[in-house]
Image (cartoon, rainbow, N blue to C red):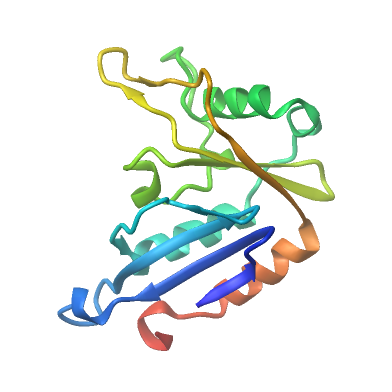
Amino acid sequence: MIIGNPYCFAVIFEVVESWNADKTFQNGILFLAINSEIFPKEIQSATLSCEFSELTDSLKNIPIDKRIFSIPVEKAYAELYNLVFPENWDIDNDYRYMISTPSFSDNDYLIFAVSNGEKIRILASHPDYCKEESIHILDGLEITETFIDISDLNKIIDKLSNIDIRRDL
């Protein structure tokens, strides 16, 4: 099922029946279409009964930060990354900016969102992870971005909120 406009922003998902013994977890596929690009780039198993609600909650709670919203894409991505994964252990992680589900982030697909109060800016990339330093490499990243009106995002959220993944699919 596709909810939204894949040329701007859409949620793409489907339960794969052969991956499920029963309806407990509803394993399947989950992708985000961002400016005509699909994330993740390869098929990964997603536990839809968990990730679906996490994604919906994340989309409902995108914070407003007009400064980050307006800066160049590379700087915006780096700042959002550092808010979610601060280097200073004394600073709390601010996961409100991250819309990656666990299956995305477990495979280093990091997708962030920020609002200016009228639009949402979504930034996605697949940075390499340096195990020695426990950090993603942000230099030279290929970042995909899109902008979506809050009213259009709310239509997607409404459709996602009305799906009971265990019952409807």
Q: Residue 67 location, x and y as percent? A: 79, 27
Instruction: Name the residue at 28% across, 61% down.
Output: 45
169 horizontally vs 147: left or right: left
* Quarter of image, res 76: top right
Between 38 and 25, the residue placed more toward the observer is 38
**Residue closest to the eye, 92 or 135:** 135
User: Is 76 on the left or on the right of 110, as rendered?
Assistant: right
In the picture as drawn, the residue positioned furthest to the right comes out as 118
Where does residue 71 sit, x and y in percent of width and height?
A: 77, 26
Q: Is residue 144 above or below residue 103?
A: above
- Where is residue 153? Give x, y as percent: 70, 62
- Residue at far bottom of view: 168
Q: Within the image, what quadrant is residue 47 found in?
A: bottom left
For the point 65% across and 73% down, which residue is it? 158
Measuring from the top left, give residue 54's x and y in whole percent.
46, 57
Decide which of 98, 91 is in the foreground and name it. Answer: 98
Residue drawn 51% across and 17% down?
A: 139
Height in image: 78 above or below 154? Answer: above
Q: Residue at x 67, y 61 (%)?
A: 7
Q: Is residue 50 left or right of residue 10?
A: left
93 relative position to 166: left or right: right
